[in-house]
Image (cartoon, rainbow, N blue to C red):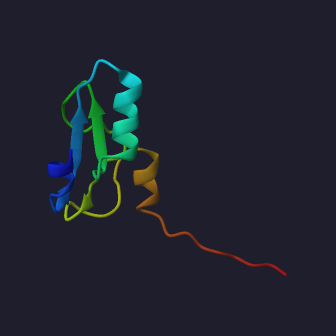
Amino acid sequence: MRIANDSRYGLGGGVFCKDVDRAVSLACDHFDTGMVRINSFGAADVNMPFGGMKDSGYGREHGGFGMKEFVNAKAVYLP
C-alpha cells in the first residue's frame, strides 16, 4: 500500500480481504485514491462518485457528489 500511495496518481485501488471490517478501515483511512473497491473489481458505477486524487484529477462525477460539481451555489442574504 505504501508503494501504491507513493505514486503521483490516485484514481482507484482495491482491497481483497476476508476481514471486511479491516478492508473498510484500510479503504477509508489508508488509501490515497478517489475510489476503492472491496473484494471486487470493475468499471465505474453511475450511482457512485467517480474521480481521483493527486495527478488523477480533482472533483467527482456521477452520484450525489457528482451532481454538485455541475452547479453554482448562490448565497442570498435578506436582512
Percent position of residue 71, x then y: 47, 64
Q: On the image, which quarter does residue 48 sit in?
A: top left
Q: Residue furthest top?
A: 18
Percent position of residue 51, x then y: 28, 53
Q: Looking at the figure, which quarter contains the N terminus?
A: top left
Residue depicted at x 29% and y 18%: 18
Viewer can see residue 4: yes
Percent position of residue 34, x then y: 30, 51
Q: Nearer the viewer, residue 13 or 17?
A: 17
Q: Nearer the viewer, residue 61 or 4?
A: 4
Q: Residue furthest bottom?
A: 79
Residue depicted at x 41% and y 62%: 70
Percent position of residue 69, x then y: 41, 61
Viewer can see residue 48: no
Q: Is residue 54 above or below residue 34?
A: below
Q: Residue furthest front?
A: 2
Q: Is residue 41 above or below residue 26?
A: above
